[in-house]
Amino acid sequence: MDASQPGGPEQVPEAGHVDDVAGPDTVAAAFSPDPLVIRDAATAAAVPDAFQRLWNPHRMAYIDAGREGEGRGHNDDCPFCEAPRKTDEDALIVARGEHAYVLLNLYPYNNGHVLVCPYRHVALYDDATAEEIREVGELTQTAMRVLRQVAHCDGFNIGMNQGEVAGAGVAAHLHQHVVPRWESDSNFFPIIARTKSLSQMLGDTRRLVAEAWPAQH
């Protein structure tokens, strides 16, 4: 569409020439909220665009820690080694076994997203002992049963990311994801806006899952 035609994109003066144009209307156009208006990055760099942003600055601490190697190979700063030393409430632990334990994911994809981890600081599935693998499997099964009971989910995503290249956030410590899924949870929010709506606080989720977890014998 020709810019001179009615309804065409409004032209904004080149950088450094805003003051050379008569009248305030042209200057205001450089800061128009209309995403279709052609803008000069030098004069309107902060003008809103067509995207909505959900700011999560606390994530940068998690990202920076990973860049610096924290939680990637040292027992004294690995979150999965530190968690069992804390109280269940502080560490979001829902169950403790002999060789492995279960805790909530601090950055859940869905409510009830739990991680099953061996206590031992081991990175890969094929480095784990038979006892660790057995208990990780048993705790995973129990987590599924408990989550069906308390969350009434319709299915699960279960799996492990092995190594940083595969997407493991804490690659140095083995952990299995158990993510509840519901028929209605695939809506436009995560697909279009890349945003998840979590309806329950982590502390409340931990309490419900822990209270429903079968007693250890």
Image (tube, rainbow, N blue to C red):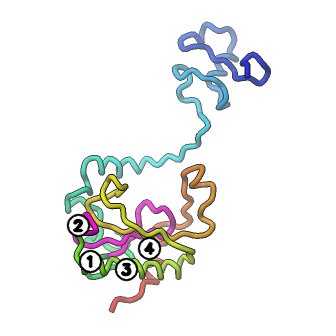
As rendered, which of 168 and 211 lies closer to the eye? Answer: 168
Q: Secondary structure at mark 2?
A: loop
- The percent coordinates of residue 105 (x first, y second) are 41, 65
Q: CA distance from mark 3 to mark 1?
A: 10 Å
Q: Where does the N terminus fall, quadrant-wise?
A: top right
Of 171 and 146, the residue lying toward us? 171
Residue contact between numbered discs 2 and 1, judged by CB atoms under 8 Å:
yes
Mark 1 Cα shell of 10 Å, populated few (<14), some (14-19), many (≥20): many
Which numbered disc flags the more N-terminal residue, 1 or 4? Answer: 1
Which numbered dot is residue 132? 1
144 with respect to 138 (left or right): right
Q: In which quadrant of the rendered view does residue 27 lie?
A: top right
Three-letter amino acid code at the position of disc 1? Glu
Q: Nearer the viewer, mark 1 or mark 4?
A: 1
Tell me where the magenta segment starts and ends, as one range. Answer: 101-126
Indicate which disc residue 139 carries: 3
Cα–Cα gap, marks 4 and 2: 25 Å
Question: Which mark is on residue 122?
Answer: 2
Dot 3 lies on which element? helix
Lower position in the chain sequence, tag 3 or tag 1? 1
Of circles 4 and 3, which is in front? Answer: 3
Residue assigned mark 4: 206
- Point out residue 43 in the picture as x, y percentages from the top left corner: 55, 20
Q: Could you tell me residue 208's position as x and y percent?
A: 48, 78
Q: Is residue 103 magenta?
A: yes
* For marks 4 and 2 on the same chain, the one whose residue lies earlier in the sequence: 2
Q: Residue at x 59, y 64 (%)?
A: 185
Is residue 52 positioned above or below 124 on the image?
above
Q: Which quadrant holds the C terminus?
A: bottom left
Q: Amino acid at mark 4?
A: Arg
Percent across and percent down for residue 202 are: 46, 67
Residue at the right extreme, as displayed? 6
